């Protein structure tokens, strides 16, 4: 997975259909694996990466509060607010209701589900 031609590290990748959903996270090379796999057939896909300014969303130990971060990933409007954490993936890929991304998964499955995202 790339964004603007560069590997997109630390992005959450979501596949969903009316019957099923699964997610994964990209590594430093932009490679991901879905935790539960994907159902064969047409799947919609959205991809999210929240950039968190230092000190924002801190938990009591000074680390990032993962619960707040996940809530932001599920609320694109909140993640695009003018202050605080920012969604860095364009809305056409990161908003589940507006995503332009789909993939047809064959019955035999696939390991070649890569997306080259435009930065704007």
Image: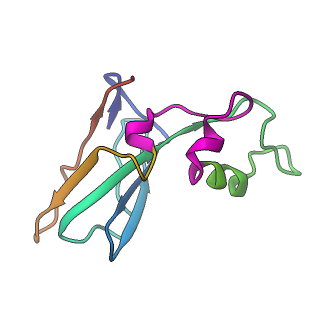
Farthest residue, direction bottom: 19
Residue at (28% x, 67% y) in the render: 38
Q: Is residue 100 above or below residue 68?
A: above
Q: Is residue 10 above or below residue 118?
A: below
Query: Horizontally, is 109 left or right of 77 in the view?
Result: left
Q: Position of residue 60 (x, y in %)?
A: 89, 51
Position of residue 5 relative to residue 19, above or below, is above
Q: Quadrant of the N terminus?
A: top left
State which quarter of the image contains the C terminus: top left
Question: Residue 76 versus residue 34: which sits nearer the camera?
Answer: 76
Q: Determine which quarter of the picture holds residue 29.
A: top left
Q: Give percent across and percent down for residue 108.
A: 10, 69
Please name the residue shown 61% across and 35% down the image. Answer: 80
Please indicate whether residue 108 sits to the left or right of residue 116 in the image. Answer: left
Q: Position of residue 33 (x, y in %)?
A: 34, 56
Q: Residue at x 65, y 43 (%)?
A: 78
Left or right of 36 in this view: 60:
right
Magenta region includes residue 89: yes
Q: Looking at the image, which residue is at 39% across and 46% down?
A: 98
The answer to whether residue 5 is magenta is: no
Between residues 42 and 27, which one lies in front from this camera angle? 42
> Which residues fall within the magenta stretch?
73-94
Residue 10 in picture, x, y percent from top left: 50, 41
- Choose top left, top right, bottom left or bottom right for residue 7: top left
Q: Left or right of 62: which side holds 93?
A: left
């Amino acid at each position: 997975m790339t964004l603007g031609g560069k590997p997109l590290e630390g992005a959450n990748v979501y596949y969903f259909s009316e019957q099923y959903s699964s997610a994964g996270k990209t590594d430093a090379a932009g490679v991901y694996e879905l935790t539960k796999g994907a159902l064969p057939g047409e799947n919609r896909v959205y991809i999210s990466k929240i950039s968190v300014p230092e000190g924002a969303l801190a938990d009591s130990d000074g680390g990032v509060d993962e619960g707040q971060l996940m809530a932001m990933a599920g609320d694109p409007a909140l993640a695009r607010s003018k202050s605080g954490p920012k969604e860095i993936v364009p809305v056409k890929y990161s908003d589940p209701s507006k995503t332009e991304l789909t993939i047809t998964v064959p019955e035999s499955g696939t390991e070649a589900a890569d997306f080259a995202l435009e930065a704007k």
